[in-house]
């Protein structure tokens, strides 16, 4: 925690470790939410060559998936069925991709390397 004059009004303000900002006016503004524990999701193999398999927790419910490239563009929308599914990577440029999963538990992102 640091104390300083953040808003330049001559009164000390309190800044907490990147989570929030407490001004001397008594208002609290959330700067970033604390990350919640990610559900137990596994990707294998990682790095991937032609494809990789995603294993979801048994209670994940209805889940949608999208594979995004480094520019944030969706390059694959794999069909999710049950607790496990395959994502094809054949034909993708080598690099780091993000697998975004949306379920009733909320959004989760996992990093996968394609070689």
Image: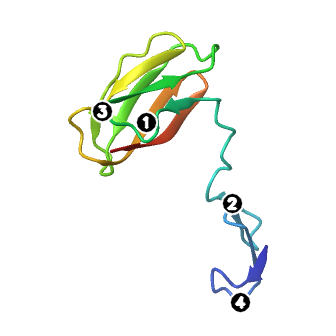
Determine the secondary structure under disc 3: loop
Residues 17 and 72: in front is: 72
Q: Which residue is mark 3?
A: 89
Looking at the image, is mark 3 or mark 4 earlier in the sequence?
A: 4
Snapshot quadrant of residue 58: top right
Which residue does the image show at 57% across and 13% down from the upper left? 61
Question: From the viewer's perspective, is residue 5 above or below residue 91?
Answer: below
Q: Which residue is mark 1?
A: 99
Residue 16 drawn at (x, y percent): 74, 68
Q: Which residue is mark 2?
A: 19
Looking at the image, is mark 3 or mark 1 earlier in the sequence?
A: 3
**Camera-side mark, 1 or 4:** 1
Residue lying furthest top in this view? 82
Between the residue at mark 3 and the residue at mark 1, the CA separation in whole angstroms equals 12 Å
Q: Are marks 2 and 3 in contact (CB under 8 Å)?
A: no
Which residue does the image show at 64% across and 30% down from the upper left? 39
């Amino acid at each position: 925690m640091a104390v300083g004059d953040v808003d330049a009004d001559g009164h000390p303000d309190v800044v907490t470790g990147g989570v929030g900002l407490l001004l001397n006016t008594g208002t609290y503004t959330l700067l970033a939410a604390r990350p919640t524990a990610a559900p137990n999701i596994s990707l294998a193999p990682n790095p991937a060559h032609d494809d990789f398999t995603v294993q979801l927790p048994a209670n994940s419910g209805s889940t949608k998936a999208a594979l995004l490239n480094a520019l944030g563009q969706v390059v694959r929308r794999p069909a999710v069925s049950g607790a496990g599914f395959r994502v094809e990577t054949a034909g993708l440029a080598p690099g780091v991709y993000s697998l975004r999963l949306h379920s009733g538990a909320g959004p989760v992102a996992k990093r996968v390397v394609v070689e």
